[in-house]
């Protein structure tokens, strides 16, 4: 066997990053900076596996442990990320990385190892068919991009313009956090700490940007987006409760991001993942994006079934309902310790 796998060290970052930038299977979530973010801001232990052949990098697999009394103990590639799994130059490298990940999961004694694949593999592991992603090319012609959006959604974008909404790129996360924290509380989800958003902004700099949407002098919506190669991915975003009375608020936000990105030469708009049969799933599909399944796969160690940690699980329904009723300051205080355990 000519392929060898080891845990990457800080000195490996340049070769890791070069491989990720050129490997078609790699995503923004394979970048080495996630190791510093997850370990520093969320205190999760990482294992970034590096496959080498004759001294050259031929594969990577970023993994991190997430321990929780409420949600269990897992090893995931990569938690808090919508994509992940093995990125490799060839099948032999992929196989060696997979076997090393299995052995690591057994040594750690986790409940399960989760790989957040973009494409199916022949591993034979159980697969969770829950999430879909939405990706579509865009061009430098924003009139063409707008016409590619179905009539009803295009009308909502125009209503947002008529409402006087304006977009503004900002440097820090303070304004975004106020909007985002209110939005996720209203959905019944614990909010991350602002420290985590600050860590992302600092780590990835120009590849992690914040767009705020204002009406008059008030921030009504905002989104943090990731840029990778020729793609843009709106990731952490939301709107305040009052935005529900503003016609086309969220439509305008995602259009303004698309417009700005196209003008910078971005050629692919990634709407991210959503669970099937949900409002966000329908929202993205109605924009003319074709849903593509994300075949997350699981190597079960101490669990006899695929984990199901998501707000749609009836097991967590009471918690979601209770969270929606919390005063915002209380939700912001209690949320971060829970959010860091969700993965």
Image (tube, rainbow, N blue to C red):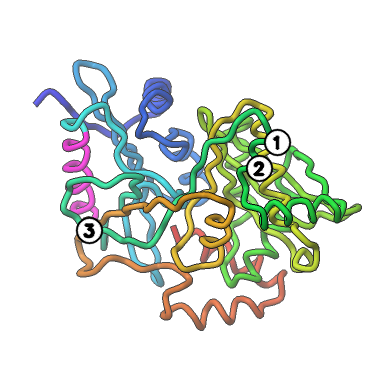
* Residue extent of the magenta highlight: 94-108
Looking at the image, residue 140 sits to the left or right of residue 94; the answer is: right
Taking 337 as reference, is 150 above or below it? Answer: above
At x 24% / y 29%, what residue is drawn? 51
Q: Secondary structure at mark 3?
A: loop
Counting the numbered discs, the total is 3
**Mark with earlier residue (3, 2):** 3
Q: Which mark is residue 143?
A: 1
Image spot of residue 325 (x, y percent) = 66, 80
At x 33% / y 47%, what residue is drawn? 117
Residue 105 sits inside the magenta stretch: yes
**Residue identified by numbered label 2:** 147
Please tell me whether mark 3 or mark 1 is closer to you in this view.
1
Image spot of residue 331 (x, y percent) = 65, 70
Q: Which mark is residue 109?
A: 3
For marks 3 and 2, give the CA distance.
52 Å
User: Local crowd at mark 1 within 10 Å, few (<14), some, or many (≥20)?
Assistant: few
Looking at the image, residue 290 sits to the left or right of residue 175; the answer is: left
At x 42% / y 55%, what residue is drawn? 132
For marks 3 and 1, give the CA distance.
54 Å
**Contact, mark 1 vs mark 2 (Cβ under 8 Å):** yes
User: Local crowd at mark 3 within 10 Å, few (<14), some, or many (≥20)?
Assistant: some
Taking 321 as reference, is 331 above or below it? Answer: above
Q: Which secondary structure class fits the magenta region best?
A: helix
Task: Determine which quarter of the picture holds residue 3.
Answer: top left
Q: Which residue is outermost to the right?
A: 216
Q: Name the quarter where the C terminus is drawn.
A: bottom left
Taking 308 as reference, is 217 above or below it? Answer: above
User: Local crowd at mark 2 within 10 Å, few (<14), some, or many (≥20)?
Assistant: few
């Amino acid at each position: 066997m000519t392929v060898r796998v080891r845990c990457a060290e800080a000195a490996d970052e340049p070769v890791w990053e070069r491989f990720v930038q050129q490997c078609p299977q790699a995503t923004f979530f394979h970048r080495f900076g996630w190791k510093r973010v997850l370990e520093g801001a969320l205190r999760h232990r990482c294992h970034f596996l590096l496959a080498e052949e004759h001294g050259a990098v031929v594969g990577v697999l970023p993994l991190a442990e997430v321990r929780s009394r409420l949600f269990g103990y897992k090893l995931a590639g990569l938690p808090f990320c919508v994509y992940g799994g093995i990125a490799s130059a060839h099948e032999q490298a992929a196989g060696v990385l997979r076997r090393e990940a299995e052995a690591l999961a057994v040594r750690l004694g986790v409940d399960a190892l989760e790989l957040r694949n973009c494409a199916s593999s022949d591993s034979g592991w159980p697969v969770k068919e829950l999430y879909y992603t939405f990706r579509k090319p865009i061009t430098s012609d924003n009139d063409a991009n707008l016409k590619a959006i179905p009539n009803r959604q295009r009308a909502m974008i125009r209503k947002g313009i008529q409402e006087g909404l304006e977009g503004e790129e900002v440097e820090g996360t303070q304004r975004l956090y106020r909007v985002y924290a209110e939005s996720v509380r209203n959905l019944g989800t614990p909010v991350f700490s602002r420290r985590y958003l600050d860590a992302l902004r600092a780590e990835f700099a120009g590849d992690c940007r914040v767009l705020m949407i204002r009406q008059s002098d008030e921030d009504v919506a905002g989104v943090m987006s990731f840029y990778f190669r020729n793609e843009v991915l709106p990731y952490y975003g939301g709107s305040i409760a009052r935005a529900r009375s503003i016609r086309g608020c969220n439509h305008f936000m995602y259009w303004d991001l698309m417009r700005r990105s196209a003008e910078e030469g971005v050629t692919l708009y990634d709407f991210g993942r959503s669970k099937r049969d949900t409002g966000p799933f329908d929202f993205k599909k109605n924009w003319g994006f074709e849903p593509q399944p994300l075949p997350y796969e699981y190597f079960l160690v101490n669990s006899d079934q695929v984990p199901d940690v998501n707000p749609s699980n009836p097991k967590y329904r009471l918690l979601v309902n209770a969270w929606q009723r919390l005063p915002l300051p209380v939700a912001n205080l209690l949320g971060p310790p829970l959010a860091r355990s969700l993965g």
